[in-house]
Each structure stands twice: as structure tokens, then as C-alpha cells.
Image: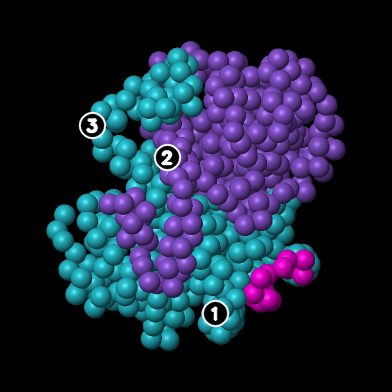
Chain colours: A cyan, B purple
Amino acid sequence: MPEIDLEKLFAGDTRTVARAITKVENGTTGAADLMKAVFPQTGKATVIGITGAPGAGKSSLVDKLALHYKDAGERVGIVCIDPSSPFSGGAILGDRIRMATLGLDKNVFIRSMATRGNLGGLSRSTVDAVAILDAAGFDKIIVETVGVGQDEVEIVKTADVSVVVLVPGMGDDIQAIKAGIMEIGDVFVINKADREGVLRTQKELEALLSLAHRPDMWNPPIVRTIATENKGIDDLAAAIESYSCYRHEAAGALQDRKIAVARWRLTELLQEALLEKLLSKNGTRDEIELLAAQIADKHIDPYSAVEQILGN
Amino acid sequence: MPEIDLEKLFAGDTRTVARAITKVENGTTGAADLMKAVFPQTGKATVIGITGAPGAGKSSLVDKLALHYKDAGERVGIVCIDPSSPFSGGAILGDRIRMATLGLDKNVFIRSMATRGNLGGLSRSTVDAVAILDAAGFDKIIVETVGVGQDEVEIVKTADVSVVVLVPGMGDDIQAIKAGIMEIGDVFVINKADREGVLRTQKELEALLSLAHRPDMWNPPIVRTIATENKGIDDLAAAIESYSCYRHEAAGALQDRKIAVARWRLTELLQEALLEKLLSKNGTRDEIELLAAQIADKHIDPYSAVEQILGN
């Protein structure tokens, strides 16, 4: 793989951006050096995390929001996190369809991050991809998750503004989800707001929000949208903007969150680096293969296997 | 915390089971020793992983399936994975309601595993909880995920039989989910089958399945259920049973999967052990705190921070 031309990257060249993201995704040699060069150039973009249950219409919402920003003359990057099978490293057909919708040019960039199945590096590579887009001068970066699992919640938490998307009448287990994402939502969206049960969902949400205690005293707004008809998108953009302003003003109150995110990133990177270091030792990979086969056959338990590898 | 009475555990005493799971969840000293003792007693239970989008009615389905097994005289354990906020360590109100529904006794055990927000040990502790239930003589162990993220997919893959739950007409982004979970589904359920669009969902699913290439040549059945009315539960149990039998007969073909799961577990445990080892060194925790604050202030990038900690 050729070196990344940093000058071109910081000038916003999309092909260079794409190559840089591939580099961090693959964790190839030089990825760490690339990120060290990228890091000082970051901090200008507004990073918007969008999460919510599948079927909530997140993709349409993200597309319409991206078009909104594009029409306002801003450059928009979209990073889509997909919980695809770790065995296949699943590619996404949807990307190409969406590119057509968004009318891809220099000002809109879309990239799906699929899992590679090895070092659990999804969160690391996603956060790095966001930093690359930031350094490349994108004004708004939207991080969209397909899943709503642990990794996805962690990633969305690294955003400047977290948007949680719900739909009316999602049934029983939405309650469980709501409880889990209550704390990460800075803005809530009830999409498909022409459906039955909007008022009930809104009331439930308001009740849950009134119980939540945010350290920063922010009162998350609830926006109703019909993404497919482009309704409510302006309101959503305004809500995002208002939290973004609030966040800048209340910078002190949010320092804790920033440090928590930094601690999480550092721990993730540390685990990855420690494992890589171990695997780079002669014979370790073979030993792991051998022990994995023995665990599968129940000749050894995984805990004893770990002790054997680490020489305890 | 008192020692776990292994004799009581293997005899299936539920209070001992609960204590043992808490032990592995907290990662307290002795957890590794406990798991080493537990491991040789495992391998008798059928582990059923259930995943799917929120709103698909998984909880109801799991409850009805558990009752089905209970009525057939089997002991059933339910482990529920919840992607709650890592900050709160979120507890689950739902658990108690469900306990009431299931009529908890010696033969039904339910436990939610929430994230603790530190070492990313959700997958490890879940897999350990399943092993504990297995060793305690539970015949069927159902692992239910609330989220559909990366960790959840990994965990469900460790099951003997993976069930993927869909509902009719979930809209656009269900396609993305489908593509990702296609490979892990051994049995597919279309729940809420009295809703409009069942046939279309079934056709779409059949089309996707016909494209998938399973190494084991299994053709995943599609079962229609209405969990709230207890309809189709027998069919689901039969489908699970048939794959379970197939899997035993085709043991050779599935050895690869077993080894892949063992390799994943080993890698997870290794990362955790390596980080723990590092953190146990004097001053490392303080150094991480200091560096996290510096990263938050953009005085250092995370990659350089990792190098500093590891003394590269």
C-alpha cells in the first residue's frame, strides 16, 4: 500500500481519505504513524452520532440530514457501523444505492465500517475514520450505527452530539432499549411520526427523560420527523445545533465526558497493542491455534490455556 | 465473598448458581479457578442463542419457549444480554416482571448480564454464565440479546443453535441487519406473524437464504410465530431440535466452527488478562488517568499515549 499523501488528505481529497480509512481499518503498518499526524488536525468538525433500533428508519434520516447540510454548503462525511458477520467481513450493498441518492461529490463522503473478525478493532477503526474525516476538513461527520449493541453505544458516545431515533409503537422490548440509551441521547427523534401511537411514545419518552439525571443539566429535545417525506429535518438540524452550542458554552461541565471517552479509547488501544505485541512473538500464533483446537475438544479450559500462553 | 460450594453448584442449587455468576461477572479473585472447576462439567446442555431487532418480540418468544421446555420437564436457564449504559451499570427492571410470568422455581433460572463498563468483559462473563448453568445441570440454556451489535453477534455464535427473530414489514434498514445475521442464523423466526407483510418478509428471507453458502450444508428453516398468543412455539422447538440433531450428526463439519469460537474466546480472555496484568503494575492506573486527561485536552494523541505506557 502506498504512503498516504498528508497534504492531499488535509486538503480534503476524497480518494486519499478513502485510502487513509482503509489503512486504519486494516491496521496495516504505518496506521499508528498516520493517526499521530492526523490527530493535531482534528477538533474542527461537529461529530453527530445516530443510533436507534433497526426499522426506525435511521438510514433515510441520515441521508436527509446529510442533504440538509450539503445544501447549506457544508461538507458531510457519513460513517456507517455495521454488525456484519465476523467471518465474512461483510460488505454492504446499501452503500452504493445510498451514494446514488446522495449525489456523491467532493462534499459528501460515505463509508461503511464492517467488522474484520480479528482484534475487535471496530471501535478503534471507526473513531480513527472520524478523526481522518475531521482532519480532511469535513464540517459535519455523521456516525450511524446499524446495531444497538455495546460497541455501538460506546462509539456513539464519542460523538459531540448523540441522536437517538425511535418510532411510534415499537412494542414491549423498546423499553429495555430506552433505558439503555437514555443516558447517551442528547437529542431524541420520533421518526415515522405519521404512524399511530406518536403521542404515547412522546409521553413515555418525556416521562423517562424527566427521571434521568444528566450531569450537564441539558434537557434533551424531542423532534418528530418523517424522513421519507423530508419532514422535520430542519428541526432536527436545529436541535443538533442547539446542543452543539450548549456543549461549547458548558465546556467545563463536559470535561468529565471527554476524559471518560479518552480513557475508553486508550484502554481499547492498549488491549489491541498488548495482543499484537504478544502475537508478534515467535510461535504464539501457532500455540493459540493448537490451544483453540484443544479447547474445542474440551482437553483444556480457556482459563488454563491463557495461563499457559502467558507463562504463569 | 464466600467460596462457591461446587457440590451444591453441580447439584443445581439456584442460589449457588446466582452467586457463581456474580463472581464471574465481577471478575473477582477466584473467578478463574471457579471456571477451571466448572469447565470439565460442561457440554451437556443445548445452548440456544436468540437475536434479532428490538421490537421483534424476543422477550415474549423466549418466555414462551422457556415455558414449553419447562412443561416438558426440562430445566431452563435464560441469560439476557443488555447493552445498557456502561456508566450506570444498568440493572433491569424487566427481570422481575418476567420472573413472575415464568413462575420461577428450581427449574427456571433467569439472569440479565449488564455491562460493567470496564474491561469490556460482557462477552466473557456471558459465556462463563452459560458454562455455569450447563455445569449446574440445566438442559436448555437460552441466551437472549437485547441489542444486535458486534458483541451480541459474537456471543450468539457461541450457541449450539442460533435463532434469528424478524417481524413482518420492518422497513428499509432490516435489509442491512439481514445481511449481517444471515450467516449466524440456524433457525429463522418471523414473529408477529398475524401482521401484514408476512409473505413478503418470508419471500425476501428465502431469497437471501438461497444466496447464502453454509459450510455445513444446513438449510435453515423459517418458523412463523405469534409469541403473545403462544402460536408456533412447538414448531420453533421442533426446528431447534432438528438443527441440534443435525449438528451432532455432522460433528466433523462443525469442528471448524467450534475451533473458531474457541479461538475467539481465547483471544478475548487473553486481552483481558494482558490488560489486567498491566493495570496491576504500580502507577499504571495513575498514568492512564493522567494521559486520558491529556488526550481530552488534545495535548497528546492516543497512539503516542499507548506507546508511552508500553514504554516503546
Q: What amino acid does circle 2 point to? A: Leu
Who is closer to the viewer here, B205 or B25? B25
Q: Distance between the residues labelled 1 and 2?
A: 35 Å
Tell which of B65 and A281 is nearer to you: A281
- The residue drawn where x is 68% and y is 70% is A214
**Which x, y percent locates residue A47?**
46, 72
Residue A282: image tag: 3
Marks 2 and 3: same chain? no
Chain of the residue on which disc 1 is drawn: A
Query: Is A83 left or right of A108, judged from the image as shown?
Result: right
Instruction: Say which chain tag 3 marks.
Output: A
Residue matched to label 1: A251
- Side of B103 relative to A254 (left or right): right
**Closer-to-camera residue (B188/B71):** B71
Q: Does the magenta stretch include residue A214?
A: yes
Mark 2 surroundings: few (<14), some (14-19) or many (≥20) residues within 10 A: many
Q: Which residue in the protein does label 2 denote? A: B274
Q: Which of marks 1 and 2 is in front?
A: 2
Is residue B183 visible in the rendered image? The answer is: no
- Earlier in the chain: of badge 1 and badge 3, it is 1
User: Residue at 82% of width from left, 30% of height from top?
Assistant: B104
* Picture quadrant of residue A297: top left
Relative to A74, is B193 above or below?
A: above
Residue A259 on image: x %, y %? 51, 66
Local packing at callout 3 (Cα closer than 10 Å; few below 14, some 14-19, many 20+) is few
Numbered range of the magenta stretch = A209-225
Q: Disc 2: which chain?
A: B
Majority secondary structure in the magenta region? loop
In depth, the one of B133 and A270 nearer the eye is A270
